[in-house]
Amino acid sequence: MPFDLSLGYLLMVMLPGLVLSGLASWRVRSAFSRYSRVPSYVGMSGAQAAHLMLERAGIHDVRVVPTSGFLSDHYNPTNKTLALSQSVFQETSLAAIGVACHEAGHAIQHAEGYAPMWLRSAVAPAASIGSNFGYFVIFLGMIFQSGMLVLVGVALFSMMLLFQIITLPVEFDASARAKRLAFEHGIVREDERRGVAAVLNAAALTYVAAALTTALTVAYYLLRASQMGSRSDD
């Protein structure tokens, strides 16, 4: 009797995924909370730090604006807007500076034509379609016990995995720029670099966790499709 993969779903996908995501979320919130209570010596706000990073890079067409939401910070290459959450935009903590400089790093990547960032933007539409319709097609395949249909759904959903994999070097590079340039531009002192790095390293873990969770999901449904194929051959 073949192993019933549905019984192993919790162990193989759900549990590791929940643990990874939970750990990553806890690390980010813990690091941000800790270093949001540590003011920088220079006293720059997140917005000021981002402006300085952009100015030193010769970028003058990016707007730095406040946005709502906790850690909703992001850079939009379409309209060249660097949006910082309130806890980052106006605060002078090491956590705020780290996040702001990271987002400024994305703006610098865009200005320099950083290849992985361009590739991520190119893959984004396909990833969105795959994320929205992949599960639906997989669900239909499970209902009709069609391994081929499940494989089609997995192929669609895999576009999200590709997007997340490409995202990793984009995020790591932005963090590396933030850690280096925040010190080189005098935004933080040598003894403050550890705090900035702690926040950015914790944030990087969330992207790793997301990619690993998606990879586990893809692997699971590939095995389910294989099992369906084996049953149809019997």
Image (cartoon, helix red, strand yellow):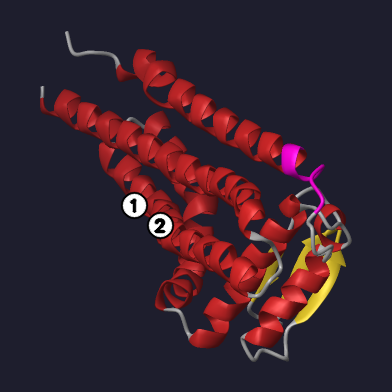
In the rendered structure, the answer to whether residue 215 lies left or right of residue 223 reads right
In the rendered structure, the answer to whether residue 124 lies left or right of residue 68 reads left
Along the viewing direction, whichever of 43 and 55 lies nearer the viewer: 43
In which quadrant of the rendered image does the C terminus lie? top left
Label 1 sits on what residue type? Ala
Q: Indicate the quadrant where residue 114 lies.
A: bottom left
Q: Is residue 37 magenta?
A: yes
Q: Indicate the quadrant where residue 144 lies.
A: top left
Compared to residue 139, the image places residue 47 above or below, namely: below
Task: Give the crowd class for mark 2: few <14, some 14-19, many >=20 residues within 10 Å.
Answer: many
Task: Tell me if label 2 and label 1 are in contact, CB under 8 Å.
Answer: yes
Identify the magenta region: 34-39
Residue for point 59% across, 73% down: 184
The picture places residue 147, in percent across and down from the top left corner, at 27, 37
Along the viewing direction, whichever of 152 and 195 lies nearer the viewer: 195
Q: Nearer the viewer, mark 2 or mark 1?
A: 2
Q: Indicate the quadrant where residue 92 lies.
A: bottom right
Along the viewing direction, whichever of 71 and 123 lies nearer the viewer: 71
Residue 159: mark? 2
In which quadrant of the rendered image does the N terminus lie? top left
Q: Which residue is mark 1?
A: 155
Label 2 sits on what residue type? Met
The picture places residue 35, in percent across and down from the top left corner, at 74, 43
The picture places residue 103, in percent across and down from the top left corner, at 65, 66
